[in-house]
Image (cartoon, helix red, strand yellow):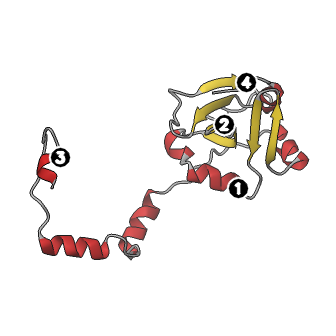
Amino acid sequence: MWNDVFEKEWEKRPGAKREELHAFLQTWNDALSVQELQEIRARQKNPFPKRPLPDSHAHLLTYSNGGEFQHGERIFQFFGTPDFREMNLAYEFAEYMPGSVSFAMDGSGNHYIFDMREPSRNGKYPILVAHSGNLGYEDCVHVANSLPEFCRGTDEIG
């Protein structure tokens, strides 16, 4: 079947032997071993910047602990206290945008992000926007110098 699928074979390796394939299919999704767990834990680090969140974010959480809002064309889907950490871990912000923290999304896959690589200025962090499928500082956009400024914006981003 596969011999007539590919136009070019840049690196074709020998096929798996029957015993090797059988063992693989039976064990590929086994529970993690003690050694695998130790290796994973050894690579882990705290993904969150050691900087305080802006006071404006705490005030927003007391206004609404998460929730969805709109101002003009701009949509806000704020993370509440129950899902804030989970969302940042799930999207691997520490890996793709170290020093940043996502606090909301726009409903179209864009994250609203505190850029915490530098200390806050008067308790404020720049706000960046990056798409969840293309997280990185190279392709993100600076959209405001503070959370209140950002939330007062009315144009759709992305």
SS under mark 3: loop
Q: Alpha carbon of mark 2 to alpha carbon of mark 3: how far?
A: 44 Å
Which amino acid type is marked by label 1? Asp
| Residue 55 at x, y percent in the picture | 83, 40
- Residue, disc 1: 83
Nearest to N terminus: mark 1 or mark 2: 1
Taking the spot 74% from the left edge, 24% from the top edge, the residue there is 145
Amino acid carrying mark 2 in the image: Ile
How far from the left and from the top, in percent, is residue 47? 57, 50
The residue identified by callout 4 is: 144
Q: Which residue is the site of mark 3? A: 5
Q: Earlier in the sequence, mark 4 or mark 1?
A: 1
Nearest to the observer: residue 25 or residue 5: 5
- Indicate which disc, 1 or 3, sits on the residue closer to the N terminus: 3
Q: Residue 104: percent from the left, percent from the top?
A: 71, 42
Q: Secondary structure at mark 1?
A: loop
Labels 2 & 3 near each other (Cβ < 8 A) = no
- Asked whether disc 1 touches disc 3, contact meaning CB atoms under 8 Å apart, the reply is no
Q: Amino acid at mark 4?
A: Ala
Q: Which residue is mark 2?
A: 113
Image quarter where the C terminus lies is top right
**Type of residue at label 3?**
Val
Say if 78 sits above or below 124 in the image: below
Q: CA distance from mark 4 to mark 2?
A: 10 Å
Asked if disc 4 and disc 2 are in contact, CB closer than 8 Å, the reply is no
Task: Look at the image and tell me in which quarter the N terminus lies.
Answer: bottom left
Residue at image coords 11%, 68%: 17
